[in-house]
Amino acid sequence: MFHWLDSEATERLLDDIRRVNAGEFDIRTVASAPILEGYRAVIGTAYALSGVVNGHPRLENGKEIVTSQLFYLNSELGICRTMNRWYRLGTREGKGH
């Protein structure tokens, strides 16, 4: 079950997904996005990622988190888009640095 935050957050998400699908995504868009280390997929009411976050605007560095709903993941580029924001992906759980 998805939990839509508000119309502005939803529009930002849809605009980002449209740009990615159209091949118009600029990796510089996520240059200052939080990084998620030791990430892994989790399933609750929706797909999400869990891991240790650094650089998040509202959460302290080194905090273990579960993201909001996951809508886009590109492990080759090392990025994902959740309902709320872009994340840069560090190492996957169980992978070395």
Image (cartoon, rainbow, N blue to C red):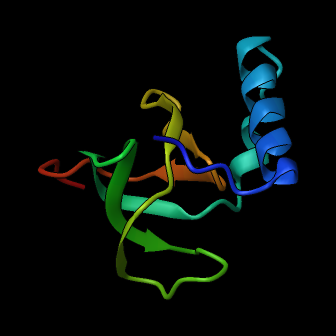
Q: Is residue 89 above or below residue 21?
A: below
Q: Is residue 91 above or below residue 2?
A: below
Q: Is residue 26 visible?
A: no
Closer-to-camera residue (82/4) = 4
Closer-to-camera residue (7/13) = 7
Quarter that holds the C terminus:
bottom left
Q: Residue furthest top?
A: 22
Closer-to-camera residue (91/73) = 73
What x and y, as percent, mark residue 46? 39, 42
Residue drawn where x is 39% and y is 47% of the image = 48
Q: Is residue 9 above or below residue 23?
A: below
What x and y, as percent, mark residue 49? 36, 50
Quarter that holds the N terminus:
top left
Residue drawn where x is 46% and y is 84% of the image = 61
What x and y, as percent, mark residue 63? 37, 81
Using residue 12 as the reference point, say whether residue 55 is left or right of it: left
Residue drawn where x is 50% and y is 61% of the image = 35
Using residue 49 as the reference point, say whether residue 1 is left or right of it: right
Q: Residue furthest left?
A: 94
Q: Residue furthest bottom?
A: 60
Residue drawn where x is 54% and y is 83% of the image = 59
Q: Is residue 34 visible?
A: yes
Using residue 10 as the reference point, say whether residue 39 is left or right of it: left
Using residue 62 as the reference point, say whether residue 86 is left or right of it: right
Quadrant housing residue 29? top right
